[in-house]
Amino acid sequence: MTQINGVGASSSMNLDGIDLSSMSTFTAAALVQLEIAKTNKDQATRYINDMKAQNDQAKRLLAQADALKSINTNPAYSKYNLPGDLEAMKKTLADVEYVEATYEKMEAQIAAGTLKPDSNNLYKLDKTSNDKLHDFVNKAGHENFPNIVRTADGSFDDLHFKYELDDGLKEIKQYKEFLNTMIKAAENGTIPKEMLSKSKLDTQSIDSLITSLQHQAENCNSDNQTQMVKLQDKMGQYNAYVSGSSDMIKTGSQLQQSILRN
């Protein structure tokens, strides 16, 4: 048995189906070093892919944390009573959108002069819109709709002054924004669905979720630092073996030229 740059060679040594024994020692050694270089490059590529996946995960985790921060920093969100679960929230959203469309239609008709107030300067809601409005305002909490609920005892009717339509529409849009945000957060896993079953938004639990997500993102970044060290090592070895292969070919060529000259 012979040694080719530290690699054992015999009369039947093969490399990817190539019989190295039929080659010069230098050519065989060059091929062996290229094969080792390729192995290091493949490992380096895996490290790069792992690092990219970790980086993407860290971005997703921080995006979730930011979404939760926007929920917790909106003072209106913590005041609403929650509908009960995700499906109830979706049904409530459909009712809110229906009433919103009614308000917007009435506003447009008032602006066009086709909808007139009664003798008391009040505008009347249709029964379906009024029933839906009463339902979600009662569930969400009257204190969140001061322009819709105007009486001291917390009851309200189907009549509105123009300014109450204007400001009531703003309250409806704010509640719609809340529902859309919470539904999206529950569906994409940012916030646990069971959290919607509470009577109010649990801001302390959300703060804990934010902290957890931030720690997970930090762990991803820490893992990437470890992977970077491994990557640099593999790339260093790759370059060394490629250089060694080139040196072997060059040495063999020089030796061959020397033999031919003599």
Image: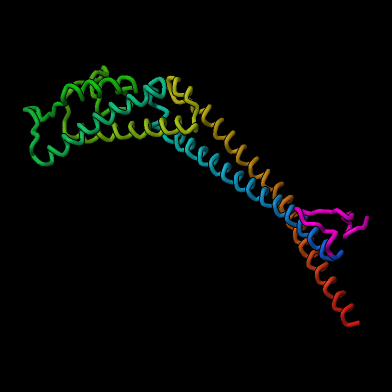
The N terminus lies in which quarter of the figure?
A: bottom right
The C terminus lies in which quarter of the figure?
A: bottom right
| Residue occupying image coordinates x 85% and y 78% | 257
Question: Where does the image place residue 42, in percent across and percent down from the top left?
Answer: 70, 52
The image quarter in which residue 220 lies:
top right
The image quarter in which residue 253 lies:
bottom right
| Residue occupying image coordinates x 29% and y 31% | 172
Question: Where does the image place residue 178, in percent across and percent down from the top left?
Answer: 37, 32
Q: Is residue 211 magenta?
A: no
Closer-to-camera residue (132/165): 132
Q: Is residue 227 left or right of residue 154?
A: right
In the image, farthest residue toward the left: 119
Q: Is residue 222 left or right of residue 13?
A: left
Q: Is residue 2 magenta?
A: yes
| Residue occupying image coordinates x 42% and y 28% | 78
Closer-to-camera residue (148/250): 250
User: What's drawn in magenta, residue-wise?
Assistant: 1-23
| Residue occupying image coordinates x 35% and y 35% | 177
- The reply to whether residue 29 is visible in this rendering is no
Q: Is residue 253 above or below residue 121?
A: below
Q: Is residue 19 left or right of residue 76?
A: right
- The reply to whether residue 177 is visible in this rendering is yes
Q: Is residue 142 above or below residue 27?
A: above
Question: Where does the image place residue 93, in percent across and percent down from the top left?
Answer: 32, 28
Q: Is residue 31 above or below residue 102?
A: below
Total tally of numbered discs in the picture? 0
